[in-house]
Image (tube, rainbow, N blue to C red):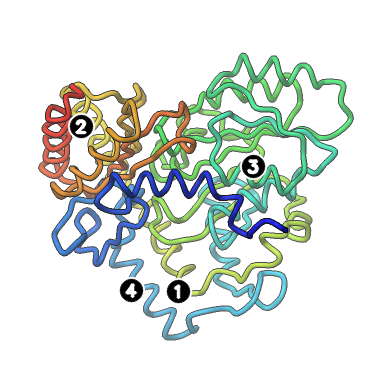
Amino acid sequence: MSAGIFDKYATLKGNYDSLMATSPRNPFGVVIERPLSATVGIIEGRETLLFGTNNYLGLSQSTTAQDAAIHTAKTMGVGTTGSRIANGTFGLHQKLEKALATVFRKKHAMVFSTGYQANLGTISALVNKDDILFLDADSHASIYDGARLSGAQVIRFRHNDPADLEKRVARTDKTTGARLIIAEGIYSMTGNIAPLKDFVEVKKRHNIPLMVDEAHSFGVLGDHGRGVAEMQGCEDDIDFIVGTFSKSLGTVGGYCVTDHDEIDLMRLCSRPYMFTASLPPEIIAATLAALEEVKNRPELRQKLQENAARLHQGFKSVGLNTSNFISPVIAVTLEDIPQAITFWNALLDAGVYVNLSLPPATPDNRPLLRCSVMAAHSATEIDRAVETFGTIAKELKIV
């Protein structure tokens, strides 16, 4: 008798059932019934502070972007009904690609329907089964899935460790296939910032292209908001920059920017690009408007950095275990899953929403309460979140 279609998930079901038996609510099914602003939403019928949305600049509620989307939906419709290589390329798509290339000071840009697909499509277009990928061990799931789709050999190096990357790259110097190094700017779970400048030195010594995912750092770091590569002064040495519109820009979609003229070949061999309906025009219009705000309102980045430092220092002051990096992603590390579930539920009961991240999705197999701070948060909102964390941590005898 053949196995049932869901039999393979028996372990997962056991873990899920165990979690649900100890939690009064599903931590992976929280519904924000209505956002009242970028920082406050209605959850379970009450006003709740939002510290788990990745809405770093608060632009999901931008009136400029809203107006652009409304006008475009009325004049151009709400969808393209096709992929970019079929009938789904509108003039707005090309306008956004030119705008992104200009912002990043690169020659070319390629827009995808999601940030996840940007990694899937870029990686699988650049390498195949004869090639080698060097991935940071803490890489996002979309990077690992892009590697799997490509069929390339994957060699992982220790998180944020240029020396380990150097050692592993050197062992492959005599291979005949192509090689590609991939890192992220800000790591989405912990908020750790990559030493991209050191990775660039490895790339140069071994003549290997380097791809960087700036999903969580675009609009956030650097004098012009271009991310960690700008902040560390190594932008010109990054071959491919991938990112998303769903964080700082507040919409949805993804992109790859590069100086390589072969980008039109990538369009023809990137299956996630070729076989997915393109972004609808109102989303493109809203993204273009948000991109202008990122360019023209540097005070948002300054305020975001101040708020990130305030939340980070606040957590440290009440004795919570966080990374030493100060970025808009600040994760509190806990010791075990039951403790994390209890803490997360108590936070939501107290009107503070954060993300609960559980093993094996976490870097060191310990649960995290992952917070994302915004430029839109007030000092009062941040201090309330810190006070709530501190009170619950004391009640649970964590500090």
Residue 20 located left or right of residue 393: right
Q: Which mark is residue 67?
A: 4
- Residue that mark 3 sits on: 240
Measuring 53% from the left and 23% from the top, which residue is drawn there? 160
| Of labels 4 and 1, the one closer to you | 1
Residue 341 located left or right of residue 276: left
Q: Quadrant of the N terminus?
A: bottom right
Label 1 CA crowd tier, 10 Å (few <14, some 14–19, many 20+): many
Q: Work out whether mark 1 precedes mark 2 in sequence or the reverse, and give the earlier one.
A: 1
Label 2 CA crowd tier, 10 Å (few <14, some 14–19, many 20+): some
Label 1 and label 2: CA atoms lie apart by 36 Å
Residue 5 position by quadrant: bottom right
Q: Work out whether mark 2 precedes mark 4 in sequence or the reverse, and give the earlier one.
A: 4
Q: Secondary structure at mark 2?
A: helix
Vertical relation: 336 (above or below) 252: above
Q: Are marks 4 and 1 in contact (CB under 8 Å)?
A: no
Measuring 24% from the left and 63% from the top, which residue is drawn there? 35
Q: Work out whether mark 4 precedes mark 3 in sequence or the reverse, and give the earlier one.
A: 4
Measuring 32% from the left and 67% from the top, which residue is drawn there? 64
Label 4 and label 3: CA atoms lie apart by 32 Å
Label 3 and label 1: CA atoms lie apart by 27 Å
Q: How many marks?
A: 4
Camera-side residue of 76 and 356: 356
Q: Which mark is residue 310?
A: 2
Label 3 CA crowd tier, 10 Å (few <14, some 14–19, many 20+): many
- Residue that mark 1 sits on: 282
Camera-side residue of 391 and 300: 391
Residue 243 located left or right of residue 36: right
